[in-house]
Amino acid sequence: MFKIFIIEDDQQIVHLLEEHLHKFGFDTKSVQDFESVRDKFEEYAPHLVLLDVNLPKFDGYYWCRQIRSISTCPILFISAREGKMDQVMALENGADDYITKPFDYDIVLAKINSQVRRVYGSYANPQQGRTTTVEGLTLDVERLCMSLHDKTVELSHT
């Protein structure tokens, strides 16, 4: 099961996103304490982040940089800011995509699935990611697969 970390201060949007994503088999966790976003990110170890620009304390650009300093997981901004510079800033600070509010849940889901395929699924570079090898057995944490002496087995996502 893929884990999505939602960094959004509008609880109604959080609830609706979680409800929609759960229908499609995603596990979600949302931020409650906006001063410890990085710590909560590290604890949850998500596969993907949905991030707003306007947040209490520090903005989404700051948290994007913080996450990028420790992870290459996909980050999708979801923001009411529609300006060209807001999108440029998000992408320049490490985001993979930018979705403007109001958004269509099917488009959000399609963009999430696209990123998951690219990073963890059939489009993923087999040389990327965190791997651990012990006595010929290799575990690729990012792609959820194991190999023993070059024979690969994909692990279940559920």
Image (spheres, rainbow, N blue to C red):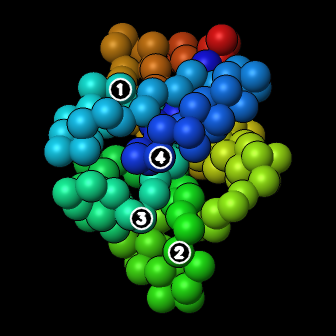
Q: Which quadrant is the C terminus positioned in?
A: top right
- Which residue is denoted by mark 1 in the rendering? 44
Q: CA distance from mark 3 to mark 2?
A: 8 Å
Closer to us: mark 3 or mark 1?
3
Q: CA distance from mark 3 to mark 1?
A: 21 Å
Q: Position of residue 41 (x, y in %)?
A: 31, 36
Residue pictured at 37% horizontal, 30% vertical? 45
Question: What number is the disc on residue 53?
Answer: 3
User: Looking at this view, is 24 or 150 the one in front?
Assistant: 24
Q: Are marks 3 and 4 in contact (CB under 8 Å)?
A: no
> Dot 3: within a 10 Å radius of its alpha carbon, few (fewer than 14), some, or many (20 or more) residues?
many
Q: Position of residue 138 (x, y in %)?
A: 45, 20
Closer to us: mark 4 or mark 1?
4
Secondary structure at badge 2 equals loop
Give the amino acid type for the residue marked by disc 2 in the picture. Answer: Arg
Secondary structure at badge 4 equals loop
> Dot 2: within a 10 Å radius of its alpha carbon, few (fewer than 14), some, or many (20 or more) residues?
some
Question: What number is the disc on residue 10?
Answer: 4
Closer to us: mark 2 or mark 4?
4
- Which residue is denoted by mark 2 in the rendering? 81
Q: Which quadrant is the N terminus positioned in?
A: top right
